Amino acid sequence: MREFLGFFALLLVIGFVVSYWKVLLGILVIAVVGAVAWFVLKYLLEQQREARARDAARSQELTHNAAAQHHSYLQGFDHGIYGNYPPVDLDKL
């Protein structure tokens, strides 16, 4: 009897799949598209988060450099005026 019920359940499942294969295929396509969209969105958000972190680090580096140059300027050093790119001494050319 148990084998018969298992065989009958298998026949019902096969009959359901054969009868509603278009609906099941549509559900499968929607699920796959949704999963792909989820992973793409997750990837893009991670890329945006990393870009923001890089921008924040670059901004902090620029702020530190500007503060160091300002301090040098207040102390009277040329580095505070010209930074990392001092003018060429034309007399030495």
Image: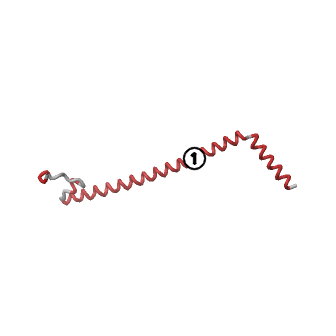
Left or right position of 52 against 19: left
Q: Residue at x 11, y 52 (%)?
A: 91
In the foreground, 57 or 20: 20
Q: Residue type at mark 1?
A: Val
State the residue lying farthest toward the right: 1
- Residue at label 1? 36
State the residue lying farthest toward the bottom: 75
In the foreground, 16 or 79: 16
Q: Quadrant of the N terminus?
A: bottom right
State the residue lying farthest toward the left: 91
User: Crowding at label 1, few (<14), some or many (≥20) Cα neighbours within 10 Å?
Assistant: few
Q: Residue at x 76, y 41 (%)?
A: 18
Colour mapping used in the image: secondary structure
Left or right position of 39 against 61: right
In the foreground, 93 or 27: 93
Residue 40 place in picture, x, y as percent: 53, 47
Q: Disc 1 on helix, strand or loop?
A: helix
* Vertical order, 32 against 57 (above or below): above
Residue 80 place in picture, x, y as percent: 22, 56
* Residue 74 lies in quadrant: bottom left
Q: Residue at x 70, y 39 (%)?
A: 22
Q: Residue at x 25, y 57 (%)?
A: 69
